[in-house]
Image (cartoon, rainbow, N blue to C red):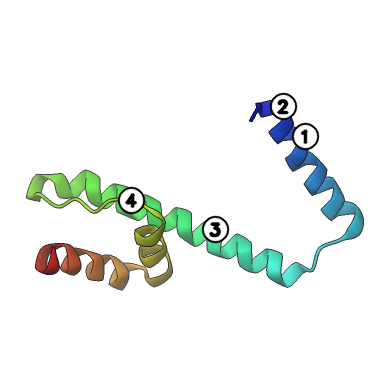
């Protein structure tokens, strides 16, 4: 897909939301979940950057980012335990 079509589509969607109005609660919830997903991916990135010295690598994908983002440090600990014990 060409970038100009994508930019026009996103701009049109934002304009439609501004004109029609969006229910604030679902949009806020989606924004919070997206933020936690990105934070989880960043936590896993730093874990992989510093964990290479001890041979620890956890792949960064939607599932692992969701677990580490939504659960925080206990989620990262669970991923480390699953990686070392089960796999």
Location of residue 26 in the rendering, given as x and y in whole percent from the top left corner = 69, 69
Mark drawn on residue 60: 4
In this image, 13 relative to 49: left or right?
right
Image quadrant where residue 83 sits: bottom left
Q: Are marks 1 and 2 in contact (CB under 8 Å)?
A: yes
Residue located at (34% from left, 60% from top): 64
Q: Residue furthest right?
A: 19
Which callout, 2 or 3, points at the residue further toward the start of the chain?
A: 2
Near mark 2 (Cα within 10 A), the count class, few <14, some 14-19 or many ≥20, is: few
Mark 3 secondary-structure assignment:
helix
Q: Which mark is residue 4?
A: 2
Q: CA distance from mark 2 to mark 3?
A: 24 Å
Up/down of 59 relative to 67, above or below: above
Q: In the image, which disc is placed on residue 34? A: 3
Q: Nearer the viewer, mark 2 or mark 3?
A: 2
Q: Are marks 4 and 3 in contact (CB under 8 Å)?
A: no
Which residue lies at the image location 27% right of the left edge and 51% below the top edge?
A: 59
Mark 4 / mark 3, whichever is N-terminal: 3
Instruction: Tell me the CA gap for discs 1 and 2.
Output: 6 Å
Sequence-earlier tag: 4 or 1: 1
Q: Residue at x 67, y 66 (%)?
A: 28
Which residue sits furthest front? 1
| Tag in front: 4 or 3 | 4
């Amino acid at each position: 897909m060409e970038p100009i079509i994508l930019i026009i589509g996103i701009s049109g969607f934002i304009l439609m939301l501004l004109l029609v109005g969006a229910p604030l609660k679902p949009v806020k919830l989606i924004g919070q979940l997206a933020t936690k997903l990105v934070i989880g991916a960043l936590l896993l990135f730093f874990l992989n950057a510093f964990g290479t010295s001890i041979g620890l690598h956890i792949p960064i994908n939607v599932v692992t980012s969701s677990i580490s983002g939504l659960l925080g440090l206990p989620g990262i600990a669970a991923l480390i335990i699953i990686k070392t014990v089960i796999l």
